Image (cartoon, rainbow, N blue to C red):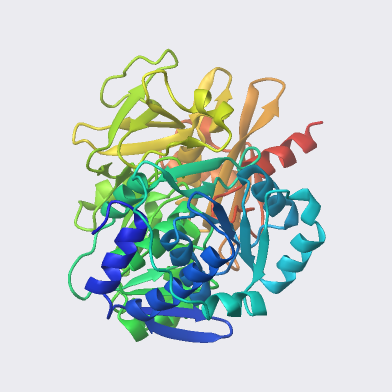
């Protein structure tokens, strides 16, 4: 990648990979373009933003669906030296308002309806100078502007990207990434062969979707972007464009495999699938193998986007039961509650460091809790390293269920329950219990036409040889699990529901 800042990397890619095909598929139609054509549009929009007074270091928020204008806007903000802030499209005004205020955004690019809402509450966002709606004159004027002439390169250690965590436990946190850390993340994303074509299922607004977009724009990777997720449509696009790789959360992969089975035409050219951002049941990886797709797990966060990842040619047990090897330059410590390193195979909190680690939160008061005094990132996740150097994430610290003094991994319960033939998805949380302190409560989504009760669950766990205390003592069958916009299960919503039963 040319350039030590993101603008330089974008300009270099437009020259080297200008003929790369980019496809944007949405409910209103499809746009096919080339990287050099998109880059020319982005230069005009960058010139328009500069003409409005957007300067290097200003934050520009983008709340847009995954259409071609979103890609243009992301590139334009970076080309003019501003800080790009992608916002999850389904955030309401309450969530967007928090992000605008906390980030100090100078401009917002969004849809017409949302633009009107923000304009009506303009006094609440004192730093916000411009609200631009795609499809209205303000956006059209940007597209007609003189192309941005360029400016001095940014310091690689300056903030270039600001993303907000999806807020599974509290108010979103503004995660600041430098040009250097984002370019390091892009370098971890492999491209395998000249026929590599990627399907993007992640929505804009979080680090996974941003990484896929920038890999296309900086790395020249042919990519098909889906504005709205639909498994049948995804399978159609795989067959039509010769898609060879994709990624998503377990929900995406399970739905895609359902579509493959219903269609009777197989998975086509799709040969690998990275699945992460949530607990991954091993049975899902095994199911993908049967469909001819080498699925493998990965682990990361907004703060450290890719800590570890598998490979499609890894042994099946490593792909199904571990989160892969550490990425180049990344180091991990597995520690006990006092911060002492634990031996290989023992579980503890994961601390990480490496070139992708963020520069700190927008609210600097949060940094002390995130980093150790000597610079390790406290991930808040529990896991272990094996003798082969593979990392396995087993839980969040707060997701451990303590029943009568016995610690139970909610992820293990979820994996065991997901292996039941009636279950398509599962989530486990702690339920308060007068006798044991906590007990296991499981929420399950079932395959159509199937049923399950606690007796069936106990029999299933016993047949798998699981310790009796790990079997759920309450089972709640639901139509769907509550999710963040990034696809993670909103465990705090389930915990609040459980607490309501016991209040």
Q: Is residue 33 left or right of residue 426?
A: left
Horizontal relation, residue 146 to residue 437: left or right: left
Residue 296 placement: quadrant: bottom left
Determine if residue 67 is in view.
Answer: no
Task: List x then y, in percent, for residue 146.
Answer: 47, 76
Whether residue 32 is visible, yes or no, is yes
Residue 348 in picture, x, y percent from top left: 39, 24
Give the left or right position of residue 9, taking residue 475 as reference: left
Residue 436 in the image: above or below residue 291:
above
Q: Pick whichever, 329 or 432, lies toward us.
A: 329
Instruction: Locate the C terminus by quadrant.
Output: top right
Q: Nearer the viewer, residue 1 or 207?
A: 1
Q: Quadrant of the N terminus?
A: bottom left
Q: Position of residue 261 (x, y in %)?
A: 42, 75
- Front in this rendered view, residue 452 or 140: 140
Residue at image point 29% right, 56% down: 189
Residue 203 vertical placement versus 162 (above, below)? below
The number of numbered badges drawn on the structure is: 0
Q: Which quadrant holds residue 122?
A: bottom right
- Residue at (46%, 78%) from the top-left corner? 24
């Amino acid at each position: 990648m040319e350039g030590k800042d993101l603008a330089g990397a974008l300009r270099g890619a437009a020259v080297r990979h200008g003929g790369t095909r980019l496809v944007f598929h949405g409910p209103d139609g499809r746009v096919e373009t080339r990287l050099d054509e998109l880059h020319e549009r982005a230069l005009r929009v960058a010139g328009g933003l500069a003409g409005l007074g957007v300067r290097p270091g200003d934050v520009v928020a983008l709340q847009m669906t995954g259409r071609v204008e979103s890609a243009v806007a992301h590139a334009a903000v970076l080309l003019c030296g501003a800080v790009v802030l992608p916002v999850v499209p389904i955030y309401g005004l309450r969530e967007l308002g928090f992000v605008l205020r906390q980030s100090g955004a100078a401009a917002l690019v969004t849809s017409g309806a949302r633009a009107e809402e923000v304009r009506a509450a303009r006094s609440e966002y004192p730093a916000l100078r411009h609200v631009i709606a795609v499809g209205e004159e303000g956006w059209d004027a940007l597209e007609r502007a003189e192309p941005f002439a360029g400016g001095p390169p940014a310091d690689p250690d300056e903030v270039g990207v600001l993303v907000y965590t999806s807020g599974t436990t509290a108010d979103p946190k503004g995660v600041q990434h430098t040009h250097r850390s984002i370019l390091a993340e892009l370098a971890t994303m492999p491209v395998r062969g000249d026929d590599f074509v990627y399907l993007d299922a992640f929505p804009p607004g979080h680090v996974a979707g941003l990484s896929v977009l920038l890999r296309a724009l900086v790395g020249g990777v042919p990519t098909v972007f889906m504005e709205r997720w639909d498994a049948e449509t995804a399978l159609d696009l795989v067959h039509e464009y010769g898609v060879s790789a994709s990624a998503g959360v377990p929900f995406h992969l399970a739905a895609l495999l359902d579509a493959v089975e219903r269609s009777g035409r197989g998975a086509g050219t799709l040969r690998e699938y990275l699945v992460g951002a949530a607990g991954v049941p091993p049975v899902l990886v095994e199911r993908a193998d049967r469909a001819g797709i080498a699925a493998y797990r990965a682990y990361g966060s907004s703060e450290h986007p890719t800590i570890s990842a598998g490979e499609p040619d890894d042994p099946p047990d490593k792909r199904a039961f571990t989160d892969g090897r550490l990425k180049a330059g990344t180091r991990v410590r597995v520690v006990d509650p006092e911060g002492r390193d634990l031996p290989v195979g023992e579980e503890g909190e994961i601390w990480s460091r490496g070139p992708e680690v963020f520069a700190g939160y927008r609210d600097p008061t949060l940094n002390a809790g995130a980093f150790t005094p000597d610079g390790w990132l406290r991930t808040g996740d529990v896991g272990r390293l094996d003798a082969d150097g593979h990392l396995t994430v087993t839980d969040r610290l707060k997701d451990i269920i303590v029943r009568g003094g016995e610690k139970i991994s909610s992820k293990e319960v979820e994996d065991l329950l997901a292996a039941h033939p009636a279950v398509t998805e599962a989530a486990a949380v702690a339920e308060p219990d007068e006798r044991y302190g906590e007990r296991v409560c499981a929420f399950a989504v079932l395959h159509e036409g199937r049923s399950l009760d606690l007796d069936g669950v106990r029999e299933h766990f016993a047949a798998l040889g699981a310790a009796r205390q790990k079997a759920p003592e309450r089972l709640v069958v639901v139509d769907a699990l509550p999710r963040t916009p990034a696809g993670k299960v909103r465990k705090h919503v389930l915990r609040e529901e459980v607490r309501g039963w016991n209040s």
